[in-house]
Amino acid sequence: MSGNGDSTSRRALVALGRDPLAVTGGVVLVLLVVAGLAGSWLAPAGINEVDVDRMLQPPSWAHPFGTDELGRDVLSRVLVAARVSLQVGAVSVGIALLAGVTLGLFAGYYQGWLDNVLMRCMDVLFAFPVLLLAVAIVAVLGPGLSTAMVAIGVVYTPIFARVTRAGVLSVREQVFVRAAVATGASDLRIMRRHVLPNIAAPLIVQTSLSLAFAILSEAALSFLGLGVQPPEPAWGRMLYDGRGFVTDAWWLGFFPGAAIFLTVLAFNLVGDALRDVLDPRQLTVSEARRNAG
Amino acid sequence: MTGESVAADAVAELTDLAVWFPTPAGVVHAVDGVSLTVRRGETLGLVGESGSGKSTTGLALLRLVEPTAGTVQVAGQDVTRWSRRRLRRLRRHVAMVFQDPQASLDPRHTVGASIAEPLAVHRLAASGAARRDRVAELLDLVGLRRDLAERHPHELSGGQRQRVGIARALAGEPDLIVLDEPIASLDLSVQAQIMNLLRGLQRELGLTYLFIAHDLAAVEHMSDQVAVMYLGRIVESGNPAQIWREPAHPYTAALLSAVPVADPPMQRSRQRIILAGDVPSPIDPPTGCRFRTRCPQARPDCAQTDPVLVEIGSGHQAACLFAGEAVRAMRAQPVNASSP
C-alpha cells in the first residue's frame, strides 16, 4: 500500500543529498562496497603471493601501499579485507538488529514483568565493556570469523533493544494504536504494522552507527588474534602483524589503519546526517530556516 | 429483533458499570455505577464535562478499559469476562470514531490502508481486488474521492480525515458505533458537514450510535435518548424533548443554560445559571449527592443521601432528591444564584 512512497523518506533523501559530509561518507561507503564485492578482481596481485625478493618494500608505482615481510602486496590485501569488514558489519549488526528489535518490541509493548526481565538482562550485557564481553564470548565459542560475528552481534543487541523499547513506549500511547486495538487487530499485527514503521527512523540511525562500531570491534578482535585467522587478510590482523615493523615499514600498519579509520568515519558521517534528517523536530527547524531565508 | 421487549432490540447494555483506576494519589472513580441501553437504529447521546467519565464509558463498551464492576453486554452476549482473543471478534461488532482524526490515523499508512484495516483484521475481503473495491465503496459512502485512498493523512484536511475515521468504523459493518466527540476538534464550518454525514449514514444504513459530547447542543438534533453524566454517574436521562424542555436535575439545567440561543431578545432575557467552582476530584467524590458542592439548590439532606435515578416521567429519569423542584427554584431566583 506504500506504492508511491512516504514523503518523509523522500524529503529525508533530498536533505541528505544537500549535506556535503553525508555525501562524502556515502561516496566512501560506495567505494567500500565496490572493494568488498570486487576486491579480488581489482587487486593488482594475489593476496597470498609470497615473493622473498620483494620483502618490506616501501610504496612505489608497482606496489602503491608497499609490500609486507613476506613480499605480499599490501594494497591487494587491504582491498580484499574490505569484504571481511563488510561481512562482519552486516552479519553482526543484522544479528543485533533482529534480536534487539524483537526483545525491545515485546518488552515495550507488554511492559510489566516481561519488560523487567528482558531489560535487566540487557542491562547486564550493557554493564560489560564491549570488547571484554566480545573477547569472553569468543573465548567460549573459539576464535574465528563466524564466532567473532556472533560475539559482536550479542554485544550490540542491548543498544537496539533500548532504542526500540524507548520508541515503542511512546508510539504505543498514540491514539492510532488504540484505534488499531479498537478494530480488533492482534498484538503482533499492531507491532508489525503500526509500531515498527513509526520507530524506523531511530533504528536506521542506530544501524548505521553500529556498523562503524562493529567493524571497529572486529578489527580489535582480529588484532588480538580472535577474529579472522591468517592467512586470510583482515584490517585488524594486518595492523597486528605490522606493529613489529612500525619503525622500519610504517606502511604495513598505516594503510589498514587508514582503511579502518575511513570506513568508521564514513558510517558515522552518514549516521549523524541520518539522525539530523530523520528527526522530525530537526526537519522542521531546517525547513523553518529555509523558509525564513 | 421482534420488538416485543426493550431488551430484544438492545444492541449494547451496561449494567452498574464501574471503572476505577488506581493512581499514586488514590483510586480514581472514573465511572461509578452507570447503567444504560443503546437500542438498535437509535442514537444515545452521552453528555458531560471533561472528567465526567463519558469517554471511559464509551471505551468500556469495546472493553478498551477493564470494568472494575458491573457487566457489559453487546448483541445479547455478556462480554464482561471475554478473553483477549474473543474480544477481537467483539470489536468487529462495535466500532469507534475518535475525537482527533489526525491522531487516530497512522501517519505512515495510506488512507486506503487505514480504511481496509478492519477488512484485513477480520478477513472480510476475499482478495486484494475485493478489498480495494470495498475501500472505494466506503470512500463513496463518506463523500470522499476514490483517489484519496493513495494519500497519507497529512495530505488531508481535518474534515476529510474524520471522514476517513468514519469510513474505517463502517468497514466491518458494526452493530454499534461509538462516536467519541467526533466533531469537537473540527472547525465550526466542518462540524455541521460531519454531523449531516453521520445522520445521513444512520438513515441509509440503519446504524446505531453512542454519541459522546461535552455539550447538549451537539447531541440534541441527533439523539433519540440523552444521558447526562456528572462525576462518573448518570444524573439524568430521557428523550431530547424532555431534557430540553423540562430538565429535572440542576446540573442538566446548568448545562442547558450554557447553550446559546439564536434569538437575541430571548438570549438576553434568559436566566443563566453559572456553577461555582470546579468539578470535585473523582478520587474523593463528595458524600451524598455528588453535585451538591456546586449545586445552587443544595440542601442539608443532599449531604446525607446519595440520590438514585428515579422515574419522573415516561422514560425520563433523574438522580436528584428534589428533582424538578430544584430546577424550578433555580430558575425563579435572580441571576448568579450560585453562591453557596
Image (spheres, rainbow, N blue to C red):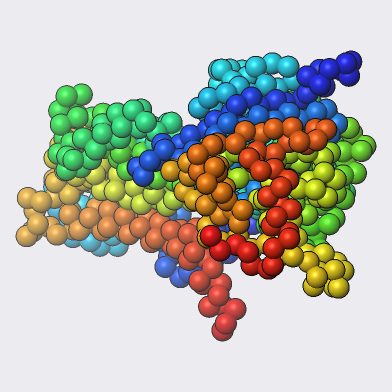
Who is closer to the viewer here, B290 or A33?
B290
Q: Where is residue B37 in the image (x, y as percent from the top left)?
A: 73, 28
When the figure is inspected, residue B89 is found, relative to residue B169, above or below; the finding is above
When the figure is inspected, residue B41 is found, relative to residue A291, above or below; the finding is above
Residue at the image position 85 percent from the left and 73 percent from the top: B264
Q: Is residue B277 left or right of residue B111?
A: left
* Quadrant of the snapshot with the N terminus of chain A: top right
- The answer to whether residue B316 of the structure is visible from this angle is yes
- The answer to whether residue A2 of the structure is visible from this angle is no
Who is closer to the viewer here, A7 or B321?
B321
Q: In this view, does B144 lie to the left or right of B214?
A: right
Q: Position of residue A76 (x, y in %)?
A: 31, 48
Q: In this view, does A250 lie to the left or right of A92?
A: left
Residue at the image position 39 percent from the left and 49 percent from the top: A206
Question: Within the image, what quadrant is residue B12 found in?
Answer: top right
Who is closer to the viewer here, A32 or B239?
B239
When the figure is inspected, residue A117 is found, relative to residue B293, above or below; the finding is above
Q: Which residue lies furthest to the front in this view?
A: B300
* Quadrant of the snapshot with the C terminus of chain A: bottom right
Q: Position of residue B195 (x, y in %)?
A: 83, 51
Residue at the image position 71 percent from the left and 47 percent from the top: B325
Q: Where is residue B192 in the image (x, y as percent from the top left)?
A: 83, 57
Residue at the image position 66 percent from the left and 43 percent from the top: B322
